[in-house]
Every structure is written in C-alpha cells, then in structure tokens.
Amino acid sequence: MQHLNNNNRGITGRQREDRLYRDILEPLSFPEQTVDSSNTFILQCPRNELLVCLFCSESAPLLQKDVLLKHLLLEHKLVIADVKLIADLPKYMLYWKGRFLEQPVKDFCSVIKTNATGPVEKQEDYFLLCDVLPEDRILREKLQQKRLEEVLEQQQKERDDSNFHRLCMFCSEEFTGNRSFLLNHMAREHSFSIGLPDNIVYCNEFLDTLQSKLDNLQCLYCEKIFRDKTTLKDHMRKKAHRRINANNREYDRFYVINYLELGKTWEEVQSEDDRELVDDENDDWSDWQSHPVSAVCLFCDHQSETMDHIYTHMKETHGFDLHNLKTELNLKFYQQVKLVNFIRRHIHQNRCYGCQENFDSRADVLHHIMAKGHVMKLPEMSIWDQPQYFFPTYENDALLCTLSDSDEDERDETNRSEDIPVIAEDISNLKILKQTSVLNQLLKHRGSSC
C-alpha cells in the first residue's frame, strides 16, 4: 500500500483534490489543451470517439480526455497511470468499466492514502489503476499489438498501391504510381524531406496536412504565418526551413516508429544514435561507403557479409530455401518477417518449428530437423503469421534487412537505388543519417521489444 502525506490542514477538501490532481494526474497524461489547438492530436484512435467514466454515465470526447480523467480523480478518486501509453483508450475504459461492475475497485487498484499520519477522519483513499496488475498489463499489450497490426497492414497497402496520384506541393509536377516517386522528388528537387517512404503511414493524410499549412501561408518548420506565397517561399528557402517541425506532435501518427514504442516519438528514437558531424561544403554521396553487415544463418553460426552467400549456405548446407518458400506461399514483406522471426525463436528455444517437439540442446533440435526432413516443413500459416513475430529474436537481425516484396524487387535493387535515394530528415546530415536511418531504427527497436 502506498501513502501520500498531506499536512496542509488549512485548505478545503476541494482545494486538496485539485492539488492532488495536479500532483498525480498531470505527469501521467498529456497537458490539457483546447479542442481547437493545432498541437492536440490523438495518436491512438479516431478523434471523434467518446470516453466513458468507469463508474457513472459521465463521458467526454477523446480530444478532451483530461476532462474525464480529472472527473475520475475528483469524483471517484481514481487515477489511471501512463495514459499516453495506452494504444486505444476508449476500449481500455470500456473494459475496466465492465470489470468494476463485476468486482470492487479495490480488487484491482493500488490504494493511495492521503494524510496517512493525520486523524482518521481526514484520511482519504485514492486508487491507482496501473500495469503492475497483470490483467491491466495484458490488456495494454493486446491493445498495442492490435494497433500495431492495423498500422502495419495499412502501411503494406500503401506500399503496394500503384494508384497514388498527387501534385508536388512546390512545383505542381504531377506524380502517379507509387508514393515514393513524389516523396523522393520533393527531397531531391526541393530539399524537402519528411523521411523514408518505408517509415511513413497514412501518407495522403500527411501530405494533406502539409498542403493545408502551405495554403494557409504557414511555414512548415517555424509555423509562422506570412502575407503571401512569395514571402513564404523566400522565407523557407533563405532560412533553410524546408522541413517539418519535429516538436509538432501532430505528425506523430504518420511515423510507424511511434506505434512500436508508444510514449517515444519518432524524433527521439532517431536522435538516440545521432553523432556530431564536421560540416563539409562538398558533402555528397560519392565518397560514402556502407559498413559491412553480417547476416547469420537461421540454423548455425555461419555468417556472411554477402546476402547471396548466406542464402546459398542455408540452401546447400541445411536444405532451407527461403526464396522458394516466399514464392510458393506468396508471402508479403511482413509475412516474411514473421516467418524468419518464428524460425529464429524456435531454434533459440531448442524446439522444432515443424512439429513443435522440444529438445535439450540446439545441436539436438538441428539433428532432429535434418533427420526428420522438417527443414522445409512449416506448420499452418495461422500458427506463425501472428503479430508477436513482428519482433526479432536477435537485435539488428541483418537477415530481415534483405527481405523484399518480390523477386523483381531484388533483381532491380541496384537500379532502383540509383533512382530512389535514401533521404534523411535533415538534408545537411545526409551521410550520418544514411547510416542511422529511421528504417534501421525501426528494425532495431522492434528487436528491443522482444
């Protein structure tokens, strides 16, 4: 049981509750803002949903969640911890409303006693609902997993979409086909980048948001308003403001990384590995050389810096043909990711992925897989095509970086790399951000969530 002391006996009960609201609730949630605020943005779910009180008929729009959270504290003496880390707050609230109808709140919550050393009549019990409770932790994880799966499915649709059609925001050139053509055009021709195409989701809505700001004569970086388009254009060019404001939380929902680590923004994740650079006026891509990355075999400790070699090794040494499986099962990119992670995890746990039999050592399970011919024997797709296998067993698994949507993608990889550049968030730091791209961070932080 936790205790909070309150020695300010001269204040009223309502004043004490207001102070408790400021001390307890505000650090656990986003700052309270008005509905029309440009910075008010709900990452997790549609903004028109209603939040319901866990105890009564009171409700509030999701955008005004702090109103309902304050109501819960002042009227029902309950605090929900880490609200910003809940992927779907409306569903979370509905779940606990049902559970509180079945059992007393004390069965689920930690009790916070105020004025614990004072007279009994001045003591009050407050309740903290948090993920220390296993049931609450499992609920939060399920909501986050469901949200992640929805976002990745949406991103896959956008990656496959060949009907994209849009005008450039800066020169009105028309683009059709894949969204990457437009994004890379803006980065290459106008020095304006919103990041790697593969790290962006809800792309059309993202571009609509940016276009609306430009139509309203607003700078995308400093967000100042100007009197006409010519003045705005000159300002963005002279001040090097051809980029978005990283502190504007309105953009968070358009970056996949935000759905992988709720509570950490895309800008924070990317900056974790930033390093100091010496400015070079002649900086270009011509002298950039990639550091060799070694991929590890799925079955043994063999490593190779050439992906063709590692695929050949697995096929010739272990009889495992990943390319053949991809073709036969018509696997999309994220299904390949799940399959690789599924096999990695089973080998790590000394379990045959074909028949689920457990063994005492890795050597035993590998001998069994080879002897029984289970190398290319996969269980039903429903067993391994699960959201839990989005996350790698080993951090920075280089084998995942080689996966693609089709064989044609692999054959044309060299040609495409010349036409579609890897564009960084900050155009002045191209060299270092190529090494620490958001996509690399995406894979890295999926691994850290295992």
Image: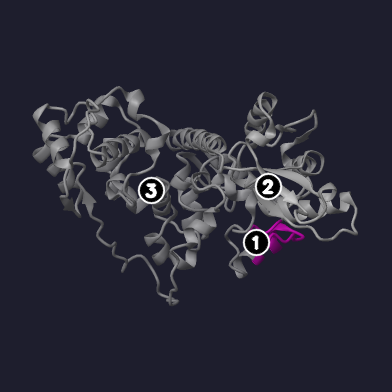
Q: Is residue 124 left or right of residue 347?
A: right
Q: Nearer the viewer, residue 371 or 275?
A: 371
Instruction: State the extent of the magenta-drawn residues as a range.
Output: 218-235
Q: Residues within 10 Å of mark 3 (few under 14, many from 20)?
A: some
| Residue placed under numbered mark 3 in the picture | 447
Name, please, the residue furthest toward the top. Answer: 380
Give the residue type that dot 1 points to.
Lys
State the colouring used for the structure image. one colour
Query: Is residue 162 in view from this perspective?
Result: no
| Residue placed under numbered mark 2 in the picture | 212
Give the residue type that dot 3 points to.
Gly
Q: Nearer the viewer, residue 210 or 395?
A: 395
| Residue placed under numbered mark 1 in the picture | 233
In the rendered structure, which disc, 2 or 3, sits on the residue that comes first in sequence?
2
In the rendered structure, which disc, 1 or 3, sits on the residue that comes first in sequence?
1
At mark 2, the secondary structure is: helix
Q: Is residue 325 left or right of residue 72?
A: left
Q: Quadrant of the C terminus?
A: top left
223 magenta-colored: yes
